[in-house]
Image (spheres, grey):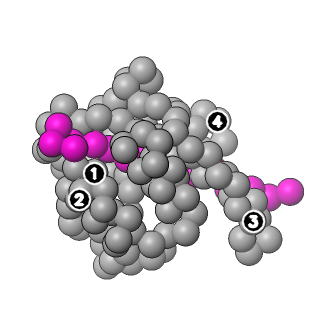
């Protein structure tokens, strides 16, 4: 059976705000939508290795394995494929990030703002879980 593997991260600033990215207008999927750092996990990667690589590619921020933690896993069936969605949390040492061309804006939002504005259904489950159990 075909499947897709994704890992994203809630990156929390020293001030307690969450880094949200906006996909660029040229993004092949969901242009100009809000996004979390992360993306597709390659077949030869663990979810954790994949999210660390994606964070580096998209924000130029490095995380070690012990600096990022799995907080939610979700499985969805969409368009004939199973998607595995793993959400991690990491704490930024500073707010400075350098975006790749995949994203054109960055925002540091309160948890309430993220819950109000971030609508992607697959990731919203994990954000709501984090709001109730991790960041409460």
Magenta region: which residues? 1-16
**From the viewer's perspective, is 70 left or right of 32?**
right
Q: Secondary structure at mark 2?
A: strand
Residue 85: x and y in percent read 60, 52
On residue 44, the disc is 4
Residue underneath mark 1: 18
Residue 7: x and y in percent read 53, 47
First in sequence, mark 2 or 1: give its number: 1
Locate the C terminus by quadrant. top left
Up/down of 102 relative to 47, above or below: below
Q: CA distance from mark 4 to mark 2?
A: 33 Å
Residue underneath mark 2: 109
Res. 106 in view: yes
First in sequence, mark 1 or 4: give its number: 1
Question: Is label 2 or label 3 in front?
Answer: 2
Q: Secondary structure at mark 3?
A: strand
**From the viewer's perspective, is 61 left or right of 82?**
left
Which residue is at a point 64% across and 36% down the rendered structure image?
A: 44
Residue underneath mark 3: 77
């Amino acid at each position: 059976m075909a499947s897709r593997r994704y890992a994203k991260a809630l990156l929390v600033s020293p001030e307690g705000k969450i880094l949200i990215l906006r996909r660029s207008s040229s993004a092949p999927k969901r242009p100009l939508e809000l996004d979390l750092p992360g993306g597709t996990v390659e077949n030869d990667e663990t979810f954790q290795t994949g999210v660390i690589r994606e964070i580096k590619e998209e924000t130029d921020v490095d995380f070690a394995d012990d600096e990022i933690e799995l907080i939610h896993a979700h499985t969805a069936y969409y368009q004939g494929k199973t998607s595995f969605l793993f959400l991690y949390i990491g704490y930024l040492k500073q707010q400075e990030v350098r975006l790749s061309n995949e994203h054109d804006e960055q925002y540091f939002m309160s948890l309430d703002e993220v819950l109000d504005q971030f609508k992607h259904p697959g990731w919203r489950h994990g954000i709501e879980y984090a709001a109730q159990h991790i960041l409460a």
